[in-house]
Amino acid sequence: MRSAFTVCFFLLMAVTSKAQYQDAIVGKWLSADGDGKVEIYKKGDKYYGKLVWLKEPNEDNGTPKVDDENPDASKRSTPLMGLVILKNFTFEDGFWQNGTIYDPKNGKTYKCEMWMDGKNTLRIRGYVAFLHRTESWTRSN
């Protein structure tokens, strides 16, 4: 009886630990260039990220910056603040994968995967065919 309890206890702890780890990316992250912050959140069993701060949020004339590089002309007037740039990530084997990242600087969307490198560093890798680029984002307030 005691060994059955011990096995159940450790299984429960393992499941709880995985659930906590998979939510480790939830929060605000400063981009590698320091120009923006992205808030990563969970919706259902998927992870998303939206722009919540920009170093320069407005144009020279004082109007909010918009997604003017978007290939879809109907979205070019969408404000960058609040724009969802990380979409549809699922957690598996220590990685958040099968998602996409949108770069509002060039209007392109890339396949992407993410992983933690310590408690306060998020590694983000975007792919174009077999080429990739990796950045490090830092946990922020």
Image (spheres, grey):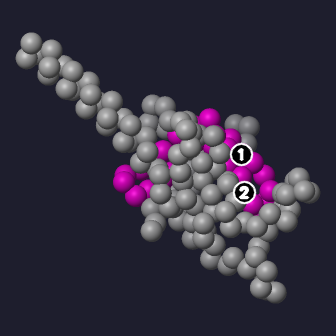
Identity, as a three-letter code, of the amino acid under mark 2: Asp
Query: As displayed, is residue 40 above or below residue 1?
Result: below
* 134 in the magenta segment: no
The stretch in magenta equals: 96-123
Question: Could you say which disc has been placed on residue 110 in the image?
Answer: 1
Where residue 107 sits in the image (x, y, percent)?
80, 56
Q: Is residue 123 visible?
A: yes
Q: Quadrant of residue 90?
A: top right
Residue placed most toward the observer, 110 or 58: 58
Query: Disc count in the image?
Result: 2
Question: Could you say which disc has been placed on residue 38 in the image?
Answer: none
Query: Does dot 1 land on a helix, a strand or a loop?
Result: strand
Q: Residue at x 76, y 76 (%)?
A: 64
Query: As displayed, is residue 110 above or below residue 85?
Result: above
Query: As displayed, is residue 114 above or below residue 67?
Result: above
Q: Is residue 134 visible?
A: no
* 117 in the magenta segment: yes
Badge 1 or badge 2: first in the primary sequence:
2
Where residue 7 sits in the image (x, y, percent)?
18, 19
Where is the N terminus found, in terms of image quarters? Answer: top left
Q: Residue at x 45, y 68 (%)?
A: 141
